[in-house]
Each structure stands twice: as C-alpha cells, then as structure tokens.
Image: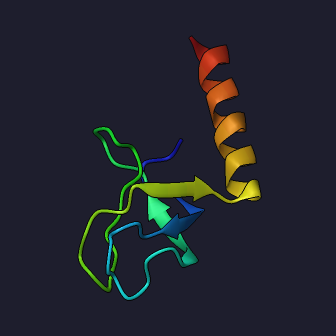
Amino acid sequence: MDDEASISMTATCRTPECPVEGQAFTASFYANGEPPIYRGICMRCGQALIDLVPTDAAAERIRADQATDLERA
C-alpha cells in the first residue's frame, strides 16, 4: 500500500460521556509506519478512536494490496 494513500473508514467514538459517543462517521485515514496501522482521535473529546472499520470499497482495496504484496514475496 502506498504510504500516502488514504482509505475511507467508519469511525465511532466509544468514550463514555463524549458528546458523539456511539455515533459513526466516515473519514479518510492514512497508514502509519507502526501499529496500529490506522489510528485517529475523536475531534470532540480528544480520545483515541478504537473502533475503525474500512468502508466496503476501502476493504476491497486493502485486500487487493495484500494480495499484491503476497505475490511479490
């Protein structure tokens, strides 16, 4: 996967008492060099987002990139 390519993910803040707790939103996320590969913070409460799920199109792109990486190995 390209280091600068973003993928679309659905993120949900699970921080108790956050004004947007439990509300899902879609945003672009960029891969990091260290695990967790994708990460973000809630812009309302500032806590780490632990519930990140690739959208269907992004998940398909990740699978295709992983298959390509396996073929090269």
Q: Please state if 57 lies on the left or on the right of 14 as rendered.
A: right
Q: Nearer the viewer, residue 68 or 47?
A: 47
Q: Please state if 60 lies on the left or on the right of 10 as rendered.
A: right
Note whether residue 5 is visible.
no
Q: How is the image coloured?
A: rainbow
Q: Position of residue 47 (x, y in %)?
A: 25, 69
Q: Residue 40's image quarter?
A: bottom left
**Residue extending furthest left?**
46
**Residue extending furthest front?**
17
Q: Position of residue 9 (x, y in %)?
A: 58, 63
Q: Residue 65's image quarter?
A: top right
Q: How many marks?
A: 0
Residue at horizontal 69%, vertical 36%? Answer: 63
Residue at horizontal 41%, vertical 51%? Answer: 38
Q: Please state if 46 lies on the left or on the right of 62 as rendered.
A: left
Q: Nearer the viewer, residue 16 or 13?
A: 16
Q: Position of residue 14 (x, y in %)?
A: 40, 66
Q: Residue 69's image quarter?
A: top right
Q: Nearer the viewer, residue 49 or 57?
A: 49
Residue at horizontal 32%, vertical 38%? Answer: 35
Q: Please state if 3 lies on the left or on the right of 58 as rendered.
A: left
**Residue extending furthest top?**
73
Q: Nearer the viewer, residue 40 or 61?
A: 40
Q: Quadrant of the C terminus?
A: top right
Q: Position of residue 19 (x, y in %)?
A: 38, 88
Residue at horizontal 75%, vertical 57%? Answer: 57
Note whether residue 37 is visible.
yes
